[in-house]
């Protein structure tokens, strides 16, 4: 027996998971992503909010994700390919850093961007 869920139904199910901290916009963006994935692959996805919570995390920004993911500035500089000036400051501007973070995430997992934040798959 199956029930077909709308985007809002999926988002509500994600939001109702008390062990997750999805914002409404994040839950909706993730629901839309899952629907698109189902359409692209032609395979039905069983909604398992626990598995989704373990596979994806929401962050307020790319910088917030980077702060959580990288051990320290040296780790970020190394993995993102940032350049340091003579004074030890990062040469790239914030837009360039965001682009490097986006590329790093996409090279290693999934990135879902929406107004108000991002969702990143675990990797």
Image (cartoon, rainbow, N blue to C red):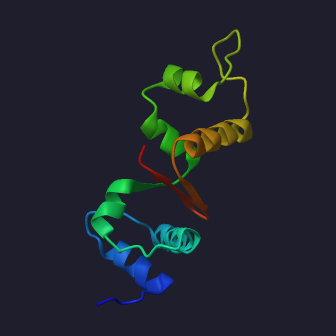
Q: Residue furthest top?
A: 86
Q: Residue furthest front?
A: 42
Q: Measuring 35% from the left and 74% from the top, which residue is drawn there?
A: 47
Where does residue 74 sit, x and y in percent of width and height?
52, 19
Q: Quadrant of the C terminus?
A: top left
Residue at point 69%, 41% (across, down):
99
| Residue 83 in picture, x, y percent from top left | 68, 20
Q: Quadrant of the N terminus?
A: bottom left
State the image coordinates of residue 89 (x, y, percent, origin top left): 65, 19
Q: Nearer the viewer, residue 73 or 57?
A: 57
Identify which residue, 59 or 2, lies in the foreground. 2
Query: Is residue 28 positioned above or below 98 on the image?
Result: below
91 vs 56, left or right, is right
Q: Position of residue 36 (x, y in %)?
A: 57, 72
User: At 49% from the left edge and 44% from the top edge, which residue is drawn?
Assistant: 65
Question: In this picture, is 48 found above or below 9?
Answer: above
State the residue at coordinates (51%, 47%).
109
Q: Is residue 68 visible?
A: yes
Residue 20 shows in this picture = no
Please, is residue 6 above or below residue 90 in the view? below
- 90 is higher (above) or lower (below) than 55: above
Q: How many marks?
A: 0
């Amino acid at each position: 027996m199956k029930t077909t869920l709308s985007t809002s139904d999926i988002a509500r199910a994600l939001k109702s998971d008390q062990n997750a901290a999805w914002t409404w916009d994040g839950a909706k963006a993730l629901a839309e992503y899952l629907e698109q994935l189902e359409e692209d692959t032609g395979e039905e996805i069983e909604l398992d909010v626990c598995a989704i919570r373990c596979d994806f995390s929401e962050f307020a920004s790319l910088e917030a994700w980077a702060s959580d993911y990288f051990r320290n500035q040296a780790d970020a500089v190394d993995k993102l390919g940032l350049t340091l000036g003579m004074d030890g400051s990062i040469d790239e501007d914030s837009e360039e850093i965001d682009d490097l973070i986006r590329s790093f995430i996409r090279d290693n997992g999934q990135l879902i961007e929406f107004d108000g934040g991002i969702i990143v798959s675990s990797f």
